[in-house]
Amino acid sequence: MGVGIHPSFKASGRGGFLLSKGPEHIRELLSVALGSGDSANPFQDEGLGEWFIFDPMDLSTFAPIQDRIKDIFADFESEDLAALQQRPDNLKIIETAEGEAAIMVYVIDLETDSKYTLGVTGSKNGLVVSVM
């Protein structure tokens, strides 16, 4: 089960950093990786940028997000954290409302072999990743 420091650096109540584990840890890593990547470093090209906030969400504009999720999970798999489940409906883009889209991400934890689902929802406010 993947374990890491909570990305918003919260205290644990015992004097250390709050740790996140399992699906919550992967959700937080994915959420950070799908962020805008805004940085003062001109040589750092991470994240998706903010273009999707200004474009209407539909099947064509959500496709780069789908590609980014595949890249992120390739990195997760190389680190033996998590992988995408082999199923035909994995990473399928669905339109949830006018101007909003979502992707269901079916994940397998490579340390525990447990399976779970993450939802990536996009709206005018940006991307939200949640454990389903």
Image (cartoon, rainbow, N blue to C red):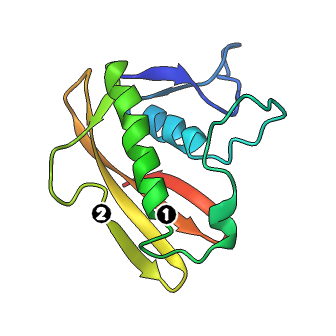
Q: Nearer the viewer, residue 66 or 117?
A: 66
Dot in front, 1 or 2:
2
- Quarter of the C terminus within the rendering: bottom left
Q: Is residue 58 visible?
A: yes
Residue matched to label 1 = 121
Q: Is residue 125 visible?
A: no
Q: Is residue 118 left or right of 124 when viewed as pictured? A: left
Q: Closer to the N terminus: mark 1 or mark 2? A: 2
**Residue 19, position in %: x, y?**
55, 23
Q: Residues within 10 Å of mark 1 (few under 14, many from 20)?
A: many
Residue at the (25%, 55%) spot, across then down: 90
Residue lying furthest left in this view?
Answer: 87
Q: Nearer the viewer, residue 92 or 16?
A: 92
- Mark 1 secondary-structure assignment: strand
Looking at the image, residue 88 lies above or below residue 30: below
Q: Amino acid at mark 1?
A: Thr
Nearer to the camera, 56 or 96: 56
At x 61%, y 42%, the residue is 47
Above or below, comparing residue 123 to residue 83 in the picture: below
Q: Is residue 122 above or below residue 106?
A: below
Q: Position of residue 52 (x, y in %)?
A: 62, 64
Amino acid type indicated by mark 2: Lys
Residue 82 is situated, as x and y percent measured from the top left of the image, at: 32, 30
Read off the residue under disc 2: 92
Q: Residue at x 71, y 13 (%)?
A: 15
> Is 113 positioned to the left or the right of 1 in the image?
left
Q: Residue furthest bottom?
A: 98
- Label 2 residue SS: loop
